[in-house]
Amino acid sequence: MDRLTLTRIVKERQLPLLLSATRRLVTPMYRAAFLAAAARSGVLGRLAVRPCDLQTLAHSLDVDQHAEELRTWLDIGVRLGDLAWFDDTYRLRSRTAKALARPGREPVAAALEEVLRFHLPVLMEAPQMLREGRRLSLSDQDGQVIARSTRVVEPFVEEAVRRTLDRDRPLRLLEVGCGAGTYVRLAAQLNPRLTALAIDLQDEVAAEAAENMAVWGLAGRVETRQGDLRTLTVEPQFDLVTLHNNIYYFPPGDRVDVLRKARSLLAPGGRLLLTTACRGGNLGLEVLNLWFTHADFGGPLPTVEDLVRQLDDAGFAQVTTRRLIPGDQFHAVVGVNAPAGRP
Ligand SMILES: C[S@@+](CC[C@H](N)C(=O)[O-])C[C@H]1O[C@@H](n2cnc3c(N)ncnc32)[C@H](O)[C@@H]1O
């Protein structure tokens, strides 16, 4: 390249901008994508046990015939600094890769996947979607990924379940939108006389929850099935109805009816426990809010005040709220289906 061309390129500042954007913006995104895929495919977990050669990894992923293509992908991981190639084997290198590989970190890997697959597209396409009148639908999500990623808030929701659940008498629980079913499992552990109906709108999510119940030895106490709260016809028999992380799957205008429906399934004196992210929280929650604002079902995250008003309007008594994550907008709301004649 002659001097003149080089000077012109440098003066235009386009190349330096591209190089700096690549380093500061693009590379972290590539890392997030690589790490999410490496976690989900089991590569991180396998390399945490011991270094592996290419053929072993290809075999574990059931792609023996495509080992060379797999090498291209793994070598990007090396280039990003998350893997190392040493002694003809791949191994974990970065602290993040090692941390994600630890047992129990699957929800964090799933949360990364949620960000990449669902948050980035809505951030990129929101203005165009508005222009075209295009909305997101439930099928734009992957219910199983969401069921796993939502587990990042598990310790906080668990605390709310522990506080609310009666342990000293037989209890009937209805869990609406059960996801993986982990909160039903906790409730069943806390109260050995608890029986439950766990429903989820999405077939594949309900099927995975049912499998989990069987693995956890709870199939005899928990009926798990596909179901929609709005059309559920069962006796008003429940002592507790729970809705965790899903009130924003209902349009704001329908929420009072949804809560009224939940109340209609409670026995007198029964309680509703609702946990949810609310408006004004961390950046991830605001992008979640953006996603649901652009959906053809559901709607924006609520505020705590919205929820209190909606529970009141749905006829609940003794409505209380509690912030579950210090410094963030993640709350539990409890309301009582007061026995007739009692406020
Ligand atoms: C973000 S996930 C949360 C899953 C689980 N509750 C948790 O906290 O881990 C929300 C779930 O609510 C379910 N859901 C949404 N609308 C529902 C409805 N009308 N009836 C039953 N489940 C519903 C969705 O299918 C989805 O699996």
Image (cartoon, rainbow, N blue to C red):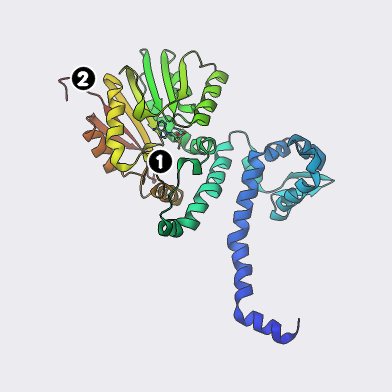
Q: Amino acid at mark 2?
A: Pro
Q: Is residue 104 above or below residue 90?
A: above
State the image quarter where residue 56 is shown. top right
Secondary element under disc 2, as helix, strand or loop, is loop
Quadrant of the snapshot with the N terminus: bottom right
Q: Quadrant of ligand 1?
A: top left
In this view, the residue in front, 298 or 273, is: 298
- Secondary structure of the residue carrying tag 1 is loop
Picture coordinates of residue 243, whole percent (x, y)? 38, 31
Q: Is residue 75 left or right of residue 183?
A: right
Left or right side of 256 for 104:
right
Answer yes or no: is residue 246 visible.
yes
Q: Is mark 2 within 8 Å of ligand 1?
A: no
Residue 164: in sight, yes or no?
no
Say which amino acid is labelled 1.
Answer: Ile
N-terminal label among 1 and 2 = 1
Residue appearing at x 70%, y 82% in the figure: 6
Residue that mark 1 sits on? 325
State which quarter of the image contains the C terminus: top left
Q: Is residue 185 left or right of residue 44?
A: left
- Packing grade of label 2 (10 A; few <14, some 14-19, many >=20) is few
Is there a contact, CB below 8 Å, between mark 1 and mark 2? no
Gap between marks 1 and 2 measured at Cα: 32 Å
Q: In the image, which is nearer the foreground, mark 1 or mark 2? A: 2
x 65%, y 45%: residue:
97
140 and 154: which one is in front? 140
Give me the disc on residue 121.
none
The residue beneath circle 2 is 339
Using the image, determine if residue 192 lies above or below residue 176: above
